[in-house]
Amino acid sequence: MFKEFKKFIMRGNMIDLAVGMIIGASFSAIITSLVNNVLMPVIGVLTGGKANFTDAFIVLKDAPAVDGVVPPLPATLEEAQAAGYICLGYGAFVTAIISFLLVALCLFFVIKAFNKAQGLTKKPEAPAAPTTKVCPFCKSEISIEATRCPHCTSELPKE
């Protein structure tokens, strides 16, 4: 059983998969950092500081009154929920969507640049050897190995 497991673990596919997962996790950290630390602050400046929608919420039900007084509405979602308000916290969802779109856009550009760079080093493939030729008598396309044309039955000259 140990030999079988060793054979399984040492397969090329398994090693490639492990390397891919490690590089993917590192790449994910780089893209997440780019989005959170570079792009989101720029969007925040362009939108007047409103790029972080995490604390945006709608109160569905007020907090229970204490001595007949409803507590004042806090500024953040966590504080509102702690005070007893029932809230629909749509802001975190909007932030997650924006973050996803920015990550996808960054990934698109990185992969596009990678594919372009990979294409620069690729050698052009040699054209494939022809498999057909044209009959000199009837001008039909025939196999390159034919000695007689199947269309006009002419004997073909040897090349």
Image (spheres, rainbow, N blue to C red):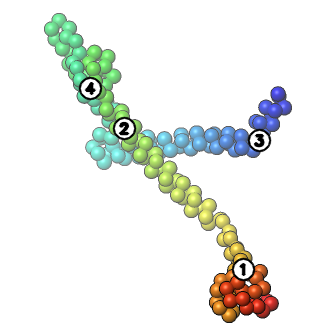
As drawn, is 110 to the left or to the right of 2? left
Q: Which residue is mark 4?
A: 75
Residue at the image point whose x is 36% and y is 38% from the top: 95
Q: Which residue is mark 1?
A: 143
Residue at the image point whose x is 46% and y is 45% from the top: 103
Q: Which mark is residue 11?
A: 3
Q: Earlier in the sequence, mark 4 or mark 1?
A: 4
Q: Which residue is mark 2?
A: 95
Residue kind at label 2, given as amino acid type: Thr
Mark-to-mark CA distance, 1 and 3? 43 Å
Determine if residue 127 is in view: yes
Residue kind at label 3, given as amino acid type: Arg
Residue 47 at what x, y percent from top left?
Answer: 29, 45
Mark-to-mark CA distance, 2 and 4? 17 Å
Mark-to-mark CA distance, 4 and 3? 55 Å
Disc 4 crowd rating (10 Å Cα; few below 14, some 14-19, many 20+) is few
Q: Nearer the viewer, mark 1 or mark 3?
A: 1
